[in-house]
Amino acid sequence: MTTETIDHITLSNLTEAGVVQSAHIVGQAGGWNVWVKYGLTERVLAAQRSHKMRIFRKLETLVSYLRSLGIVQFDVDAKNYDPENVATTRTRPDSAAKMKSAHEAAAYDTWLKAEIQEAIDDTGPNFSHEQVMAEVQAIIDAKRKQHANKTKR
């Protein structure tokens, strides 16, 4: 069975319009969710990114959220709440690793832009590709000759 959800924006709009009839907080393994009734419809609040049922780990956080919307009366069903399971149900990816990666990428971008700007601003003499390749080839030939002379001895 698929549970129909309601997102934060819709819930906020319904609350502002004064059509939310009731809110029902339900405890479960891992935390708390909230069911909202408006008209003949009852839906559970959805998480912003996954659009699945939003789970609040702390009841205080959920109460503060509902109060911020203007919902100050609700009932609580703690029958299935399992406080032992709260810490073990975390499924969000490691935010610290994402932030570290983002900071590393930003630092690399800053470094690369500075290197490019330094090359653009360089007023030193320009050398043609052919000239540079000829000089490199001369160095390679000299090293080969030096190596060959050492092995003949």
Image (cartoon, helix red, strand yellow):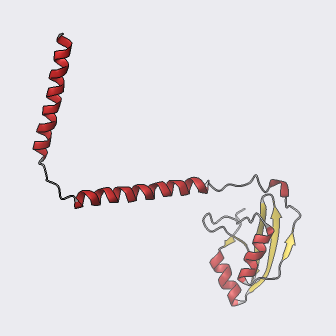
Image-based side of 51 in relation to 40, left or right = left
- At 64% from the left and 79% from the top, the residue drawn is 10
- At 68% from the left and 70% from the top, the residue drawn is 5
Residue extending farthest to the right is 79
Question: Which quadrant of the structure image shows residue 45?
Answer: bottom right
On the question of residue 41 being in view, the answer is no
Please tell me which residue lies in front, 84 or 33: 84
- At 84% from the left and 54% from the top, the residue drawn is 84
Quadrant of the frame with the N terminus: bottom right
Image-based side of 73 in relation to 106, left or right = right
Residue extending farthest to the top is 153
- At 76% from the left and 63% from the top, the residue drawn is 57
Image-based side of 130 in relation to 76, left or right = left
Image-based side of 34 in relation to 145, left or right = right
- Image coordinates of residue 113 in percent, x first then y, are 33, 59
On the question of residue 59 being in view, the answer is yes
Please tell me which residue lies in front, 84 or 79: 84
- Image coordinates of residue 16 in percent, x first then y, are 68, 88
- Image coordinates of residue 48 in percent, x first then y, are 62, 68
